[in-house]
Every structure is written in structure tokens, then in C-alpha cells.
């Protein structure tokens, strides 16, 4: 993760944070959330749809928060606040379900959900009660997206999607964009009194294409720079390995020369000993 953050900081100057998304660390899939200060860098990254890091190509999508639910701090049930709670007359411990009047007794109490009797705290999203409430909430929001605040997009977790439904988000039908109201002209037959329709000019089309081309060229340039950097590193590593190989080869040659010298010395010693033995034997034979 630190290596990834370092590489991203080299690519983007406005990096605010890089963190792994909770609940997504698996062997098959891994999601990382990147936050940027600069809007231009953010748009370029999002428009490219891909991110090249150390020769690996990653998909880039806009981060959308999943729908949150309101959980009562008194009874630990979803759908209302503590002030509006009519379920319990006392504060219920989310660990064991007992009266939370004495906080010291509930710091290390046994964890057992008082809603479903499961081995988790009662406010855990794994609880079937909360999970079902969340599922129902998402279904209602999908049926009535007009009830969402303007310009709102929410991510639908995979557990709450319908079968064979590839929709991943819920989007509000309303927008905060200002609406221009035009009063109708008094003479409806006077066409000049009506406001001109906004047309898509060729210049606007060319401008959008130029922006897309610019983003594409920037991406290609970045990938080219990374490729050149990898090539340079490869050449340096190859040169280092070659030097290491030559060094080992030189050491082996020196060792072989030493072995040959040692063999030659041993041969000379054997010949010298042989001559001495012959001389001694010959002199002994002459005396006898």
C-alpha cells in the first residue's frame, strides 16, 4: 500500500489521501479510494477510466457512498432517533442488550445481539434486522428517486442488488442547476419574440473532441514516460548483472589459474622426491 501511495504521489500533485476501502480486501478484488484536491486532475483521471501503475492497468470509477441508515442510540433499532424512540424506556447496551445505566459493567460484557441473538453488536450491519431494513430502504429509494436531495448519487452494495440487475447506483432526478423562466410573448405569432434555441455548434463539438484528445494524449504521454522509465531501469539492471557476471567470471579464472599453479607445484614436488629416492636407492645399491 505504501508503494502504491508513493507511485500515485509521483503521478498526481494534489493527492489528499489514499486508503483501502473497508470490507474490500480479498484475494480476488481490491479497491482503493483516492482523494484529490485539484478538480482538473480528478476529471482527467475519471475521464481516462484507467490508471497505469508499475505496468499494471487498473480501472477507475467515481466513488459513490452507499446509503446510510439512522440507528437509534437508545434501543439500537433502525428507522428513528433517540428523541423519537418509543421502543425502550432505558438505554440498551448494544453489546449484551442490558440496561446501560452503569457504563463500567458494559465495557467488557458478552457480545450478543438482542435483536437476532447473533454473535455481534446490535448495530452491526451484519445483523439481519438492520440488513433487511437497509434492503427495504434501498428498494424504496429505487422506486422513488425523486425523494432524494438534488444532485445525489448513491452506490448500491452488491448484496442489495436484484438478480441480473447491473445497476450500481441510485441517482436523484432533481438538480440544483438554476432554471431560467421565460415569460411567453404577448404576440404568439411573432417568432422573433421567442428566445433562440441553443444549438450544438461545430465549434462546441470540436472543443469537446479536442478536450478528449488532450486527455488521451496526456494519458499516452504519461504511459510513454513510464515505459521509458521502466526501460531505463531495465538497462541499468542489465548492466549491473553483466558487471556482476564479469566479476564472477574473473574470480573463476583466477581460481582456475591458482589450481593450475598448485597442480604444477605438486608435479614438481613429486618429481623432486622421485629423483631423491632414485639417488638414494642407486647409492645404496653401489655400496652393497
Image (cartoon, rainbow, N blue to C red):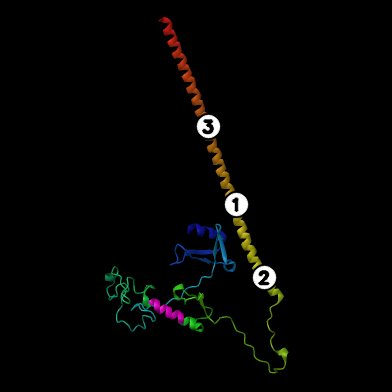
Q: Is residue 136 magenta?
A: yes
Quarter in which the C terminus is drawn: top left
Q: Residues within 10 Å of mark 3 (few under 14, many from 20)?
A: few
Q: Which residue is mark 2?
A: 209
Q: Find residue 45 and report its image quarter.
A: bottom right
Residue 47 % position (x, y): 59, 68
Q: Residue at x 58, y 44 (%)?
A: 239
Left of 230 or right of it: where is 201?
A: right
Name the front one of labels 3 and 2. 3
Looking at the rendered structure, the secondary structure element under dot 3 is helix
Magenta: main secondary structure equals helix
Q: Residue at x 63, y 65 (%)?
A: 216
On screen, residue 225 above or below 65: above
Give the residues in magenta: 130-139
Q: Find residue 196 and report its image quarter.
A: bottom right
Alpha-carbon distance for marks 2 and 1? Answer: 32 Å
Alpha-carbon distance for marks 3 and 2? Answer: 67 Å
Q: Residues within 10 Å of mark 2 (few under 14, many from 20)?
A: few
Q: Earlier in the sequence, mark 3 or mark 2?
A: 2
Q: Residue at x 44, y 8 (%)?
A: 283
Q: Which residue is mark 1?
A: 231
Residue 156 % position (x, y): 48, 75
Q: Earlier in the sequence, mark 3 or mark 1?
A: 1
Asked if the residue under mark 2 is in contact with the one under mark 3, i.e. CB atoms within 8 Å, the reply is: no
Name the front one of labels 3 and 1. 3
Looking at the rendered structure, the secondary structure element under dot 2 is helix
Q: Residue at x 53, y 32 (%)?
A: 254
Q: Which residue is mark 3?
A: 254
On screen, residue 84 above or below 49: below
Amino acid at each position: 500500500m505504501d508503494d502504491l501511495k508513493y507511485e500515485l504521489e509521483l503521478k498526481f500533485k494534489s493527492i489528499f489521501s489514499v486508503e483501502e476501502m473497508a470490507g474490500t480486501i480479498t484475494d480476488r478484488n481490491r479497491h482503493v479510494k483516492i482523494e484529490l484536491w485539484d478538480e482538473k486532475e480528478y476529471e482527467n483521471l475519471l475521464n481516462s477510466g484507467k490508471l497505469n501503475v508499475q505496468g499494471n492497468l487498473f480501472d477507475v470509477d467515481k466513488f459513490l457512498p452507499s446509503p446510510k441508515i439512522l440507528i437509534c442510540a437508545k434501543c439500537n433499532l433502525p428507522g428513528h432517533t433517540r428523541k423519537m424512540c418509543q421502543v425502550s424506556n432505558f438505554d440498551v447496551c448494544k453489546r449484551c442488550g442490558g440496561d446501560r445505566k452503569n457504563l463500567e459493567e458494559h465495557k467488557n460484557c458478552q457480545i450478543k445481539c438482542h435483536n437476532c441473538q447473533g454473535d455481534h453488536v446490535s448495530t452491526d450491519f451484519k445483523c439481519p434486522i438492520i440488513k433487511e431494513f437497509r434492503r427495504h430502504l434501498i428498494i424504496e429509494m429505487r422506486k422513488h428517486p425523486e425523494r432524494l436531495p438534488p444532485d445525489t448519487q448513491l452506490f448500491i452494495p452488491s448484496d442489495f442488488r436484484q438478480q441480473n440487475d447491473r445497476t450500481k447506483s441510485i441517482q436523484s432526478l432533481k438538480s440544483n442547476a438554476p432554471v431560467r423562466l421565460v415569460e411567453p410573448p404577448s404576440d404568439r405569432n411573432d417568432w422573433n419574440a421567442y428566445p433562440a434555441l441553443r444549438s450544438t455548434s461545430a465549434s462546441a463539438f470540436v472543443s469537446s473532441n479536442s478536450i478528449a484528445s488532450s486527455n488521451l494524449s496526456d494519458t499516452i504521454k504519461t504511459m510513454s514516460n513510464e515505459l521509458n522509465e521502466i526501460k531505463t531501469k531495465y538497462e541499468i539492471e542489465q548492466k549491473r548483472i553483466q558487471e556482476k557476471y564479469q566479476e564472477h567470471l574473473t574470480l573463476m579464472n583466477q581460481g582456475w589459474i591458482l589450481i593450475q599453479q598448485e597442480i604444477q607445484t605438486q608435479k614438481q614436488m613429486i618429481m623432486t622426491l622421485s629423483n631423491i629416492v632414485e639417488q638414494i636407492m642407486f647409492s645404496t645399491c653401489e655400496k652393497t
